[in-house]
Image: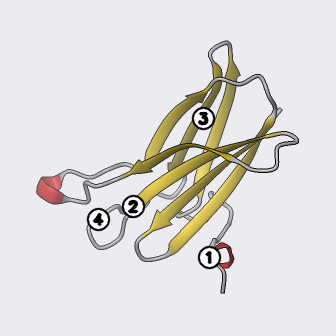
């Protein structure tokens, strides 16, 4: 089995593991907001948490996506401090394309979503 065959998708309104992507084109560039648990909050405890989110941008007509950032969440309840799996990034580009977000839950594995940027 290939790693790519283990990546899951779904409707983020019904599945708490799917990353949600919001994009906005501004004079500063492409603003990206990616998070897990917008409609259904993810518990983010030591036993069950989102360990990381990776964000990519693939410009139209480009063969491969470009990694925008990799974000690790490390606070899972120590002294009642909990990470919230949410990231913000800005990419300087005038190109249209696709934003990808990949998240990893320590129990339920890899989850992916995409957002077209026009």
Rounded to the nearest whole Å, what is the CA distance between mark 3 and mark 4?
26 Å
Mark 4 in CB contact with mark 2 (< 8 angstroms): no
Residue marked by disc 3: 32
Q: Secondary structure at mark 3?
A: strand
Tell me the CA gap for discs 2 and 3. 19 Å
| Mark 1 → mark 3, Cα distance in angstroms | 26 Å
Secondary structure found at label 2: strand
Q: Which residue is mark 2?
A: 51
Circle nearer the N terminus (2, 3): 3
Mark closer to the chain start, 3 or 4: 3
Residue under pointer 1: 3
Report the side of 27 relative to 38 (left or right).
Answer: right
* Labels 4 & 1 near each other (Cβ < 8 A): no
Q: Tag 1 or tag 4, which sits nearer the N-term?
A: 1
Label 4 crowd bin: few (<14), some (14–19), many (20+), radius 10 Å: some
Q: Is residue 89 left or right of residue 93?
A: left
Q: From what the image shows, is residue 25 above or below residue 51?
A: above
Residue 85 placement (x, y as % from top left): 42, 50
Q: Which of the two labelled residues, at mark 2 and mark 1, occupies the earlier sequence position?
A: 1
- Residue reaching furthest to the right: 61
Alpha carbon of mark 4 to alpha carbon of mark 2: how far? 10 Å
Question: Most extreme residue toward the left, as rendered?
Answer: 79
Picture residue at 58% right of the left edge, 47% below the top: 55
The residue lying toward the viewer, choosing from 17 and 28, is 28
Badge 4 is on which residue?
A: 45
């Amino acid at each position: 089995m290939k790693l790519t065959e283990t990546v899951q998708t779904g409707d983020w309104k019904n599945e708490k593991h799917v990353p949600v992507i919001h994009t906005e084109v501004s004079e500063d560039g492409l603003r990206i907001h990616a998070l897990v648990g917008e409609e259904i909050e993810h518990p983010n405890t030591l036993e069950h948490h989102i360990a990381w989110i990776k964000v990519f941008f693939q410009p139209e007509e480009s063969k491969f996506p470009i990694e925008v950032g990799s974000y690790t969440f490390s606070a899972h309840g120590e002294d009642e401090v909990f990470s919230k799996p949410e990231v913000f990034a800005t990419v300087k580009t005038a190109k249209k394309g696709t934003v990808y977000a990949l998240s990893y839950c320590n129990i339920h594995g890899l989850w992916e979503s995409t957002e077209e940027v026009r």
